[in-house]
Amino acid sequence: MIKLYTGLGSGNSYKAELLLHLLAVSYTPVPVSIPKGEHLDPAFLRLTPFGQIPVLVDGDAVFTDSQAILCYLARAYGGAMANRWLPIEPGQIAAVMRWLSFAANEIQNGPTMARAAKLLRWAVDYDRAVASSYRSLRLMDRHLAGRDWLATGAASIADIACYPYLLLASEGGIDTTPFSAVTAWMRRLESLPGFWPMPRIPNLPPVPLVPYERLAD
Ligand SMILES: N[C@@H](CCC(=O)N[C@@H](CS)C(=O)NCC(=O)O)C(=O)O
Protein backbone atom coordinates (compact mmCIF):
# COMPACT_ATOMS: atom_id res chain seq x y z
CA MET A 1 0.00 0.00 0.00
CA ILE A 2 1.27 3.46 -0.92
CA LYS A 3 1.19 6.31 1.59
CA LEU A 4 1.74 9.92 0.56
CA TYR A 5 2.58 12.57 3.14
CA THR A 6 1.00 15.64 1.67
CA GLY A 7 -0.48 18.99 2.65
CA LEU A 8 -3.27 21.31 1.57
CA GLY A 9 -1.83 24.03 -0.68
CA SER A 10 1.45 22.20 -1.31
CA GLY A 11 2.11 22.31 -5.05
CA ASN A 12 5.02 19.91 -4.69
CA SER A 13 2.76 17.34 -3.00
CA TYR A 14 0.12 17.89 -5.64
CA LYS A 15 2.59 16.84 -8.37
CA ALA A 16 2.76 13.38 -6.77
CA GLU A 17 -0.98 13.19 -6.12
CA LEU A 18 -1.78 14.24 -9.67
CA LEU A 19 0.39 11.50 -11.16
CA LEU A 20 -1.05 8.91 -8.76
CA HIS A 21 -4.51 9.86 -10.05
CA LEU A 22 -3.46 9.89 -13.71
CA LEU A 23 -1.98 6.41 -13.24
CA ALA A 24 -5.09 5.29 -11.29
CA VAL A 25 -2.90 4.10 -8.41
CA SER A 26 -4.67 4.03 -5.06
CA TYR A 27 -2.90 5.54 -2.07
CA THR A 28 -3.52 6.81 1.41
CA PRO A 29 -2.89 10.53 1.89
CA VAL A 30 -1.34 11.45 5.25
CA PRO A 31 -1.86 15.18 5.92
CA VAL A 32 1.10 17.16 7.26
CA SER A 33 0.41 20.78 8.19
CA ILE A 34 3.37 23.05 7.45
CA PRO A 35 1.72 26.09 9.18
CA LYS A 36 1.33 23.96 12.34
CA GLY A 37 4.97 22.85 12.07
CA GLU A 38 4.09 19.16 11.74
CA HIS A 39 6.95 18.73 9.23
CA LEU A 40 9.33 19.32 12.16
CA ASP A 41 7.83 16.60 14.38
CA PRO A 42 10.52 14.10 15.41
CA ALA A 43 8.52 11.20 13.95
CA PHE A 44 8.29 12.97 10.59
CA LEU A 45 11.98 13.89 10.67
CA ARG A 46 12.80 10.24 11.28
CA LEU A 47 10.96 9.47 8.04
CA THR A 48 12.74 12.26 6.18
CA PRO A 49 15.57 14.38 7.58
CA PHE A 50 14.69 16.92 4.86
CA GLY A 51 11.54 17.80 6.83
CA GLN A 52 9.58 18.49 3.67
CA ILE A 53 6.51 17.18 1.92
CA PRO A 54 5.83 15.26 -0.24
CA VAL A 55 7.10 11.92 1.02
CA LEU A 56 6.02 8.73 -0.68
CA VAL A 57 6.17 5.44 1.21
CA ASP A 58 5.78 2.29 -0.87
CA GLY A 59 6.22 -0.78 1.31
CA ASP A 60 9.64 -0.41 2.93
CA ALA A 61 10.84 2.22 0.45
CA VAL A 62 10.70 5.93 1.26
CA PHE A 63 11.01 8.56 -1.47
CA THR A 64 11.37 12.32 -1.01
CA ASP A 65 11.41 15.22 -3.49
CA SER A 66 8.50 15.68 -5.87
CA GLN A 67 10.63 15.29 -9.01
CA ALA A 68 12.16 12.05 -7.67
CA ILE A 69 8.72 10.76 -6.71
CA LEU A 70 7.42 11.48 -10.23
CA CYS A 71 10.33 9.46 -11.67
CA TYR A 72 9.63 6.56 -9.31
CA LEU A 73 5.90 6.49 -9.95
CA ALA A 74 6.27 6.77 -13.73
CA ARG A 75 8.66 3.82 -13.91
CA ALA A 76 7.13 1.68 -11.13
CA TYR A 77 3.45 2.20 -11.93
CA GLY A 78 3.36 3.58 -15.48
CA GLY A 79 2.66 0.10 -16.93
CA ALA A 80 2.32 0.27 -20.70
CA MET A 81 2.58 4.07 -20.45
CA ALA A 82 5.83 4.12 -18.43
CA ASN A 83 7.90 5.12 -21.46
CA ARG A 84 5.49 7.92 -22.21
CA TRP A 85 5.55 9.40 -18.71
CA LEU A 86 9.33 8.97 -18.37
CA PRO A 87 11.04 7.89 -21.59
CA ILE A 88 14.32 5.99 -21.42
CA GLU A 89 15.68 6.96 -24.84
CA PRO A 90 18.75 9.15 -24.06
CA GLY A 91 17.65 12.31 -25.88
CA GLN A 92 14.14 12.11 -24.47
CA ILE A 93 15.19 11.46 -20.88
CA ALA A 94 17.49 14.47 -21.12
CA ALA A 95 14.59 16.57 -22.43
CA VAL A 96 12.40 15.48 -19.50
CA MET A 97 15.20 16.13 -16.99
CA ARG A 98 15.66 19.60 -18.44
CA TRP A 99 12.10 20.52 -17.33
CA LEU A 100 12.29 18.70 -14.01
CA SER A 101 15.26 20.95 -13.25
CA PHE A 102 13.30 23.95 -14.46
CA ALA A 103 10.52 23.04 -11.99
CA ALA A 104 13.00 22.66 -9.13
CA ASN A 105 14.94 25.84 -9.89
CA GLU A 106 13.28 28.47 -12.08
CA ILE A 107 9.70 27.73 -11.01
CA GLN A 108 10.62 27.18 -7.35
CA ASN A 109 12.55 30.48 -7.26
CA GLY A 110 9.89 32.33 -9.25
CA PRO A 111 6.17 31.69 -8.73
CA THR A 112 6.66 29.41 -5.72
CA MET A 113 8.68 32.04 -3.85
CA ALA A 114 6.36 34.91 -4.90
CA ARG A 115 3.47 32.89 -3.44
CA ALA A 116 5.42 32.07 -0.27
CA ALA A 117 6.03 35.81 0.18
CA LYS A 118 2.32 36.58 0.00
CA LEU A 119 0.78 33.48 1.54
CA LEU A 120 3.32 32.58 4.21
CA ARG A 121 4.96 35.99 4.65
CA TRP A 122 8.36 34.45 3.91
CA ALA A 123 11.15 37.04 3.90
CA VAL A 124 12.06 36.57 0.25
CA ASP A 125 12.89 39.21 -2.35
CA TYR A 126 9.40 39.55 -3.85
CA ASP A 127 10.39 41.78 -6.78
CA ARG A 128 13.12 39.37 -7.75
CA ALA A 129 10.71 36.41 -7.57
CA VAL A 130 8.19 38.29 -9.73
CA ALA A 131 10.80 39.24 -12.35
CA SER A 132 12.09 35.67 -12.38
CA SER A 133 8.51 34.32 -12.76
CA TYR A 134 7.80 36.47 -15.79
CA ARG A 135 11.14 35.60 -17.36
CA SER A 136 10.33 31.90 -16.95
CA LEU A 137 6.77 32.29 -18.22
CA ARG A 138 8.02 34.14 -21.31
CA LEU A 139 10.55 31.40 -21.95
CA MET A 140 7.95 28.65 -21.53
CA ASP A 141 5.48 30.50 -23.72
CA ARG A 142 7.99 30.72 -26.57
CA HIS A 143 8.95 27.07 -26.08
CA LEU A 144 5.31 25.92 -26.13
CA ALA A 145 4.35 27.93 -29.21
CA GLY A 146 3.71 25.26 -31.85
CA ARG A 147 4.12 22.29 -29.53
CA ASP A 148 1.70 20.57 -27.17
CA TRP A 149 3.98 19.32 -24.39
CA LEU A 150 7.17 20.53 -22.75
CA ALA A 151 9.61 17.69 -23.32
CA THR A 152 8.34 15.16 -25.85
CA GLY A 153 5.44 14.69 -28.24
CA ALA A 154 3.21 13.48 -25.38
CA ALA A 155 2.40 14.39 -21.78
CA SER A 156 5.28 13.39 -19.52
CA ILE A 157 6.33 13.97 -15.93
CA ALA A 158 8.01 17.18 -17.17
CA ASP A 159 4.55 18.68 -17.69
CA ILE A 160 3.31 17.49 -14.30
CA ALA A 161 6.36 18.95 -12.51
CA CYS A 162 5.92 22.40 -14.06
CA TYR A 163 2.14 22.70 -13.82
CA PRO A 164 1.18 23.18 -10.12
CA TYR A 165 3.01 26.40 -9.27
CA LEU A 166 1.84 28.00 -12.50
CA LEU A 167 -1.71 27.03 -11.56
CA LEU A 168 -1.12 28.71 -8.17
CA ALA A 169 0.79 31.68 -9.59
CA SER A 170 -1.98 34.25 -9.04
CA GLU A 171 -1.80 33.52 -5.29
CA GLY A 172 1.61 35.17 -5.50
CA GLY A 173 0.50 38.05 -7.71
CA ILE A 174 1.79 36.51 -10.94
CA ASP A 175 -0.46 36.89 -13.97
CA THR A 176 -0.30 33.93 -16.37
CA THR A 177 -2.98 35.27 -18.73
CA PRO A 178 -0.59 37.13 -21.12
CA PHE A 179 1.10 33.77 -21.87
CA SER A 180 -1.40 32.14 -24.20
CA ALA A 181 0.71 29.10 -25.12
CA VAL A 182 1.27 28.39 -21.41
CA THR A 183 -2.40 28.73 -20.52
CA ALA A 184 -3.40 26.52 -23.50
CA TRP A 185 -0.88 23.90 -22.30
CA MET A 186 -2.37 24.03 -18.79
CA ARG A 187 -5.89 23.46 -20.17
CA ARG A 188 -4.49 20.57 -22.28
CA LEU A 189 -3.00 18.95 -19.19
CA GLU A 190 -6.30 19.42 -17.33
CA SER A 191 -8.03 17.47 -20.14
CA LEU A 192 -5.93 14.32 -19.64
CA PRO A 193 -7.99 11.26 -18.66
CA GLY A 194 -7.89 10.85 -14.89
CA PHE A 195 -6.90 14.47 -14.26
CA TRP A 196 -7.52 15.40 -10.61
CA PRO A 197 -7.90 19.11 -9.80
CA MET A 198 -5.82 20.47 -6.95
CA PRO A 199 -7.79 21.05 -3.73
CA ARG A 200 -7.32 24.76 -3.06
CA ILE A 201 -6.96 26.63 0.22
CA PRO A 202 -10.37 28.27 0.78
CA ASN A 203 -10.97 31.99 1.32
CA LEU A 204 -7.49 33.24 0.49
CA PRO A 205 -7.34 37.04 0.40
CA PRO A 206 -6.87 38.19 -3.21
CA VAL A 207 -3.32 39.23 -4.14
CA PRO A 208 -2.98 42.14 -6.61
CA LEU A 209 -1.46 40.90 -9.86
CA VAL A 210 1.80 42.57 -10.90
CA PRO A 211 1.25 43.66 -14.54
CA TYR A 212 3.56 41.74 -16.86
CA GLU A 213 3.83 44.69 -19.23
CA ARG A 214 5.69 46.64 -16.56
CA LEU A 215 8.49 44.10 -16.68
CA ALA A 216 8.43 42.99 -20.31
CA ASP A 217 11.57 43.41 -22.36
N1 LIG B 1 12.58 19.79 -3.57
C1 LIG B 1 11.42 19.46 -2.79
C2 LIG B 1 10.87 20.68 -2.11
C3 LIG B 1 9.71 20.31 -1.20
C4 LIG B 1 9.17 21.50 -0.45
O1 LIG B 1 9.74 22.61 -0.49
N2 LIG B 1 8.07 21.26 0.24
C5 LIG B 1 7.46 22.28 1.04
C6 LIG B 1 5.94 22.23 0.92
S1 LIG B 1 5.43 22.55 -0.75
C7 LIG B 1 7.84 22.04 2.47
O2 LIG B 1 7.73 20.95 2.96
N3 LIG B 1 8.34 23.09 3.14
C8 LIG B 1 8.76 23.03 4.50
C9 LIG B 1 10.19 23.37 4.64
O3 LIG B 1 10.95 23.37 3.65
O4 LIG B 1 10.59 23.62 5.79
C10 LIG B 1 10.35 18.83 -3.69
O5 LIG B 1 10.33 19.13 -4.89
O6 LIG B 1 9.56 18.03 -3.21
Image (tube, rainbow, N blue to C red):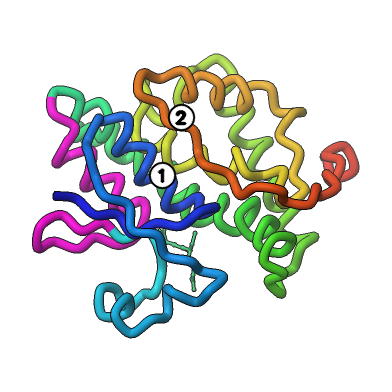
**Is the C-beta of the residue carrying label 1 under 8 Å from the nearest atom of ligand 1?**
yes
Work out which residue is located at the far right of the displayed protein and give it.
214
Q: Residues within 10 Å of mark 2 (few under 14, many from 20)?
A: many
- Seen from the viewer's position, the closer of residues 187 and 27 is 27
- Identify the secondary structure beneath mark 2: loop
On the image, the x and y values in percent for residue 215 come to 85, 45
Q: Is residue 134 among the parts visible in the rendering? A: no
Residue 78 position (above or below residue 39): above
The image quadrant of residue 161 is top left
Q: Which residues are magenta?
A: 56-79
Q: Residues within 10 Å of mark 1 (few under 14, many from 20)?
A: many
Task: Find the distance from the CA under tag 2 to the CA under tag 1.
Answer: 16 Å
On the image, the x and y values in percent for residue 92 come to 29, 32
Residue 63 position (above or below residue 207): below
The label number, if any, that marks residue 30 in the structure image: none
On the image, the x and y values in percent for residue 170 come to 72, 43
- Seen from the viewer's position, the closer of residues 63 and 195 is 195
Work out which residue is located at the far left of the displayed protein and give it.
60
Tag 2: amino acid? Leu
Which residue was labeled with disc 1? Answer: 15
Which residue was labeled with disc 2? Answer: 150
In this view, the mark in front (2 or 1): 1
Q: Residue at x 71, y 74 (%)?
A: 123
The image quadrant of residue 144 is top right
174 drawn magenta: no
On the image, the x and y values in percent for residue 159 come to 43, 34
